[in-house]
Structure formats: C-alpha cells, structure tokens
C-alpha cells in the first residue's frame, strides 16, 4: 500500500489547519453560507436533510486494517455507530457535527486519510478496479497511476474551480471493473505493439440527467506523458465547459457539443503546447517509487488447489455457496480474493457498523496481508486470502454478519441514499432495495437468475448508477407521490451500455412486483447460460414492455 | 484600496478608462479588450503603460501577440468566485504566451483562492474588503509544498523527492 512520506503528511496536516480556519470563519460569520459551501464541499462536507454528512476519501478503494479501525472509531465516537460505503469507493458519515469535523479530520490524518476533494467542482477522488494487484488479467496495477493522479490533482491551482465536478477512473485490466466509460475521464492501462506501457484515455462519459459513454481521445499515451495529457483535457474543459447551466456543465456535454473528433483535436493541440513547456513530465524514478509501495505482498508458494478448502466445501453447503459466489480467482496459485457483501437480505446497501468494520480489519490483518478494498458496488474485498484459510475467513465473516453469499446476484443491489438522507431526492431508494432484496431472498432462485445488477437512484443525478444497471430504477416525483421508472439493458462493464426505459413508472409498493415480472419474462426467453442482460440484448425490449404494461396498468 | 501584491512584483498604478471616456493626456491606463482592438494605435501611441481587462469569458489567446508584447498589465476578471477560468488564463499568459507584465485578479474571490492564484502566475489582487494584507500573507503560507508544476516556478514534490 502507498505510505505517506513527509511531503504527503505535511500536505494533509496543512489542509486540516486550513479547513479548521474556514470552519472558524464560517462560525464567526466572516464567510457566508454561499461562500463556505464550495469550501466545505471541497473537503467532503455536505449539508443534508437532517445534518452534515462527511465524505472521507478512500483513494482507489484501498484501506489498511489500521485505517478501517480508525473509521470504526469515528463511527462510534462522532456518528451513530455506522458508516456508509459509496459507489465511489468512499465512506460517508451521516451525522457528524460541524464543530467536530476538524477533530475527525485530525483523527483521519493520523492514519494517512483525508476528505480532500471528495466533493466540489474539482478533480474528485480517483477510483480503480477493486481487484487491483490480485486479478489474473491485469496489465498493470491501476493503483500506481491512480496514486500519481491523486497527487497531481490535489490542490491543483488551475483546476479547483471547474465548471462542475470531475471524476477519473482507472482500470488495469481489459475486463473493466472500474466503469471507466461512465467517467469524465476513464483510463485503461495498455501495452502497444512494441510492448511499451501506456494508457488509452476516454473523456466525456457520465451519468446524471444526460447519461453518455466516454469517447476515446487518446489511443496510446505514453507513461511519462500521461499527466501532461490529462492536464490538456482539463484545460480544454476549464476554458470551454459551460458555466451558465449546472445541468450542462459536465465535460460530457462539451464533448457532445464539440463532437468527439473536435474534442480530440483540441486536446491534442493543448497537449502539444504543454509538451513544449516540458514541465509536466512524469519522471521514471517517481513511477518506480510509487510502484515499490504496491509491490506484491510476500505470497507463499502454494498448490493451486487447497485440500482444506475442498474438504470444507464438501462438508458445509453454506460455505460452498459462499465460495461459488463471493470468491474471485487470484493471479497467484493457492490464493483468492474474497468479496464481503454489504447487502444482507433486507439491509441497507453499503452500510457497515463499527463492530463489522473492526471485524473486517481483524480478518484482513490476519488473513489478507492487512489489505481491504472498497468496491464501486458498495461491497468490500479481502484481496489476498490463502485458499487454505477460506473456511476460517468465512466463519469469521459469518460471526460478524458479513457472509451473505450474493455477490453479483439480484440482491447485490446498488442504491443511493435517496430520500432518507439526501435533500435532492424525489423518492426513497433504500426501502426499495430492501423490498427487492426481501422478495428475492431465496438462495436457489437467486443463483438460478445468475448475474443481475440492479441499481437504484433516488433522482436523476444517478448516484445509484441506474443508467448502467442491468435493471435500473429511478425515483421520480409524480404529483407529490414517489414513483419509479424502470430501465433495462445498462452495463458499466467493458460492454458498457445505457439502459432504456420500459413501461410506465410504478409506485413504491409495486416495484418488487415489476422486477418479478421482468425476471419472469427473462426466465421464459433465456437460452443457454444467458444472463438477463444478454437475453434483453437478444430479444429486445418488446416482450418485457408487453408484460409490464399488462401487469401494471392503472 | 490599492492592489495587493502576491508576487515579487510591485503592482503598477493604472487608471481605469471606460469605453466611452476619452483617454487621459498622461498616465498609465487600463482599457477593455474591445477598445484595445478598436483603438490599438491611439492607445499605444501614448507614452505611458497600457493594461487590458479581460472578462472571464475572454481568452488571452485572442489578444494579438504584438499587442501582448506591448501590454504592461492584464487584469483578469473574476465575476464570481466559482468561475475558475481566470486560473487557466493566468497560467496560459505565463507559460504559453510568455507574458512578462503584471497579471492582476479583480472581482469576487475568496482568500482561500489566493494560494492558487499566486501559483497560476497572478501578481496582484483587487478584491473585496476581506482581501487584506494579513489575509493575503496567511493565504500564501497555506501549503509548504506543492504537488504539481504551475506558473510560479516552484519545485513540485516530485522533483524534490528525486533531487
Ligand atoms: S441520486 Fe439523487 S437522491 Fe440519490 S443521492 Fe444522488 S442526488 Fe441524492
């Protein structure tokens, strides 16, 4: 894992001091709320329906056990005993008091954490594949570039007051687990024909009210040029992105209005100018320095198959089900990555209480080289577990209520906070997730449905990524009553696509019925090993629409 | 209030001249980009320094290079503190266009932005009553180190790490 050196540590300490001063000026009335707002947002502090919410950065979703324990402490001491893991691999605390925030930031700084740029119209916390460093299909560990980008973008003097927020994601594998095509900038680590390391850069993706997939603006950017290239994209956006209408201010709108070719031309021209100045060259030594922090942990030489695991699977059906669903193959023989579902049946997606955080920290320290990951699907991962230890890990997770075997299944639902917390919401998201989860709780039928990604947003801002759900659910307001629009066919993976609305909006109490209708149509039409997404892509929307209309006509 | 310096350069004394007002007989003036374009010869024929004020949507790239060479001052307007285009304009004036004169920020901005302004190559500030000399010196000391190169010539952490 990356460790702060004296420079990083000082930067974070000075930021805490600056923010403490801003809070003091606000409390003294020297700053208006309008002026304080972007300043606090740039440090992850929101004012929500009932209270402040603090969003803490977990850069590229990587945490140590010590950091996880500190998050548990903060949850206990300053919140109501829990935290909420988000689709951007961050954690949110929903109940801090404004006066406590400087102390929370101090507590975070002690474990090399912060809330820098987790909100505001700046470059946000960078996200990456949660199996980084463990996945067999990885071209390059995406955390190295992510950390380089984190540093370059931190307190960037030119790009801290952009037209709108700006999100960057990096995938190190051809199989995109970082959803790069729906980010403002998405980066894929690649190799060219000569085997040299470089990056393919996409720009202009996003969700929200106008969902768009990013276009390629750089086919192969060499490693030492990558920051200069990113700076070029940022500058074109800062100059030309719209500032008159916040709904049209994201880079996706600029790319759409200019056209992908023109955007590419402008970025290239800007890139050429920046290269002439030459200051933003990434030194090889710096890449190597950061790479050394992400060196593989001391893996043991193990047989690929574990007799201990096999025996336990044969003995214990629940464990076997867990292994079948929550284990991802590891690049090193004898190891596996374990996903910890934060989606218990009927629970709140992404929530973990302090005791669970401590339990995960403990398990990671003992069995996963002290490492934990947060996924953009609001789950956790123990990246490097010996297959021989899987049974012990499963038992420990079970004891903490964390062994739900539903990764990728219908009950592994992404949901934004919705009307329970968010002042922009039209409708609740959490209770809808809970209804669906309860409805589809049966293990055998979940597994029979296979991979099925349901994503729920409480309004068009799409924090719950409904556009890219195999089934997307969007809360809308119809004459003061919560309604839900259902779409099908979205995907955030390497086969990225945006869902299409099927059927009329339904009320909260019929969402689970509508999902059941959709699932029935899928069951009737599927062939071979098709997922719902595949069946939908093959047969189209019509059969789904017909049944939904018939079932939900009011 | 006279402009406050945030660089090693002392701010020059200029008089703002409205588009419909005659140019004074003597003394340094600031005119709009439109007036400069329309009355280039007259403006530069005077023997005094000339500054131009750019609104936040006006890119310095639109100034003819020969005009830029003769300008002593570029004033960048910050209409609202949320409008961050001025940061890019300052940076481009310095690192791309090689502008050596004074760059001044004017309008609505917060002391929390001053550190960034200095980094982008801005020399002087004309802000509201809160932008005092004390606020400025505190703001400039916010961070000891910087993570990226900009227009102020400061060595980034990356270079410091590798000698
Ligand atoms: S999608 Fe809407 S309701 Fe949900 S968290 Fe985002 S802004 Fe709030």
Image: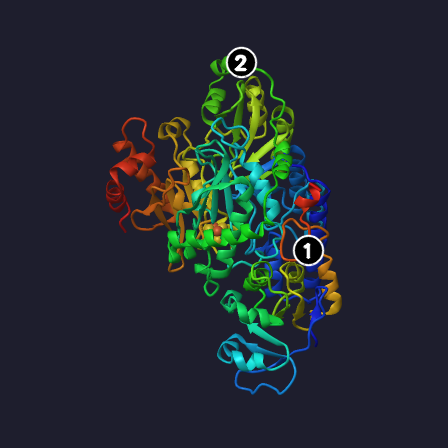
> As drawn, is A3 to the left or to the right of A216?
right
- The residue drawn where x is 46% and y is 19% is A317
Identify the image quadrant of residue B140.
Answer: bottom right
Q: Which mark is residue B78?
A: none
Identify the image quadrant of residue A450.
Answer: top left
Report crowding for label 2: few under 14, some 14 to 19, many 20 or more residues within 10 A (C-alpha): few
Which residue is identified by label 2? Answer: A303
> As drawn, is A113 to the left or to the right of A481?
right
Q: Position of residue A508 (x, y in %)?
A: 39, 48
Report crowding for label 1: few under 14, some 14 to 19, many 20 or more residues within 10 A (C-alpha): many
**Disc 1, SS:** helix
> As drawn, is A511 to the left or to the right of B29?
left
- Which residue is nearer to you in this view: A373 or A437? A373
Residue A535 position (above or below residue A393): below
What chain letter is assigned to the residue under label 2? A
Q: Position of residue A370 (x, y in %)?
A: 64, 29
Residue A476 position (above or below residue B129): above
Q: Position of residue A363 (x, y in %)?
A: 62, 27
**Disc 2, SS:** loop
Cβ(mark 1) to ligand 1 < 8 Å?
no
Q: In whole angstroms, how far apart are the C-alphas of marks 1 and 2?
A: 52 Å
Q: Position of residue A60 (x, y in %)?
A: 56, 40
Of labels 1 and 2, earlier in sequence is 1
- The residue drawn where x is 67% and y is 59% is B115
Which residue is identified by label 1? Answer: A19
């Amino acid at each position: 894992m990356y460790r702060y050196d004296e420079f990083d540590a000082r930067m974070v300490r000075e930021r805490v001091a600056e923010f403490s001063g801003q809070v003091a000026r606000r409390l003294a009335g020297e700053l208006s709320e309008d002026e304080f707002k972007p300043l606090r947002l740039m440090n992850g502090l929101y004012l929500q329906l009932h209270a402040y919410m603090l969003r803490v950065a977990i850069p590229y979703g990587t945490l140590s056990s010590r950091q996880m324990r500190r998050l548990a402490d903060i949850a206990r001491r300053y919140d109501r005993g829990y935290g909420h893991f988000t689709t951007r691999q961050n954690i949110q605390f929903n109940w801090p008091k404004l006066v406590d925030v400087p102390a929370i930031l101090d507590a975070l700084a002690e474990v090399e954490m912060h809330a820098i740029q987790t909100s505001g119209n700046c470059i946000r916390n960078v996200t990456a594949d949660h199996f980084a460093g463990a996945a067999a299909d990885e071209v390059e560990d995406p955390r190295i570039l992510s950390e380089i980008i984190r540093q370059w973008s931190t307190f960037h003097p030119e790009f801290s007051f952009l037209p709108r927020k700006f999100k960057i994601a990096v995938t190190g594998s051809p199989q995109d687990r970082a959803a790069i095509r729906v980010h403002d900038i998405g980066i894929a680590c690649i190799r060219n024909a000569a085997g040299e390391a470089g990056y393919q850069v996409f720009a202009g993706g996003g969700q929200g009210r106008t969902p768009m997939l990013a276009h390629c603006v750089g086919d192969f950017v060499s490693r030492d040029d990558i920051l200069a290239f990113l700076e070029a994209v940022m500058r074109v956006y800062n100059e030309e992105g719209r500032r008159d209408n916040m709904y049209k201010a994201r880079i996706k709108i600029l790319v759409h209005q200019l056209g992908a070719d023109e955007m590419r031309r402008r970025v290239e021209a800007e890139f050429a100018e920046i290269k002439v100045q030459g200051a933003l060259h990434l030194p090889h030594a710096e890449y190597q320095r950061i790479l050394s922090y992400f060196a593989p942990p001391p893996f043991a030489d193990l047989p690929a198959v574990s007799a201990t695991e096999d025996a336990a699977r044969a003995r214990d059906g629940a464990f076997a089900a867990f292994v079948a669903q929550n284990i991802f193959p590891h690049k090193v023989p004898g190891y596996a990555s374990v996903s910890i579902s934060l989606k218990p049946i009927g629970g709140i997606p992404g929530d973990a209480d302090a005791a669970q955080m401590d339990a995960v920290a403990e398990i990671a320290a003992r069995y996963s080289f002290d490492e934990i990951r947060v996924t953009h699907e609001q789950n956790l991962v123990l990246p490097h577990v010996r297959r021989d230890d899987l049974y012990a890990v499963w038992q420990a997770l079970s004891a903490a209520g964390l062994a739900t075997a539903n990764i990728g299944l219908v009950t592994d639902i992404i949901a934004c906070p919705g009307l329970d917390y968010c002042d922009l919401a039209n409708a609740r998201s959490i209770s809808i997730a809970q209804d669906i989860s309860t409805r589809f709780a049966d293990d055998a039928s979940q597994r029979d449905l296979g991979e099925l990604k349901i994503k729920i947003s409480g309004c068009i801002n799409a924090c719950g990524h409904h556009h890219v759900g195999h089934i997307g659910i969007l809360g809308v307001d119809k004459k003061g009553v919560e309604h839900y629009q259902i779409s099908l066919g979205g995907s955030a993976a390497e086969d990225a696509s945006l869902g299409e609305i099927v059927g009329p909006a339904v009320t909260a109490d019929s969402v689970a019925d509508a999902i059941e209708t959709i699932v029935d149509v899928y069951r009737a039409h599927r062939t071979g090993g098709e997922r719902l997404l595949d069946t939908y892509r093959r047969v189209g929307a019509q059969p789904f629409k017909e049944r939904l209309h018939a079932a939900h006509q009011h | 209030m006279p402009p406050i310096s945030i660089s090693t350069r002392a701010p020059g004394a200029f008089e703002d001249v409205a588009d419909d007002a005659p140019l004074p007989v003597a003394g340094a003036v600031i005119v709009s980009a439109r007036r400069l374009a329309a009355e280039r010869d007259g403006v530069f024929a005077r023997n005094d320094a000339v500054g131009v004020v750019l609104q936040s949507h006006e890119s310095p790239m639109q100034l003819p290079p020969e005009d830029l060479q003769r300008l002593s001052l570029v004033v960048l307007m910050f209409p609202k503190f949320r409008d961050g285009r001025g940061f890019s304009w300052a940076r481009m004036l310095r690192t791309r266009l090689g502008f050596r004169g004074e760059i001044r920020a004017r309008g609505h901005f917060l002391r929390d932005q001053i550190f960034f302004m200095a980094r982008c190559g801005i020399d002087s500030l004309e802000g509201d009553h809160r932008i005092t000399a004390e606020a400025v010196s505190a703001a400039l000391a916010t961070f000891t180190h910087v993570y990226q190169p900009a227009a102020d010539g400061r060595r980034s952490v990356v270079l410091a790490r590798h000698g």
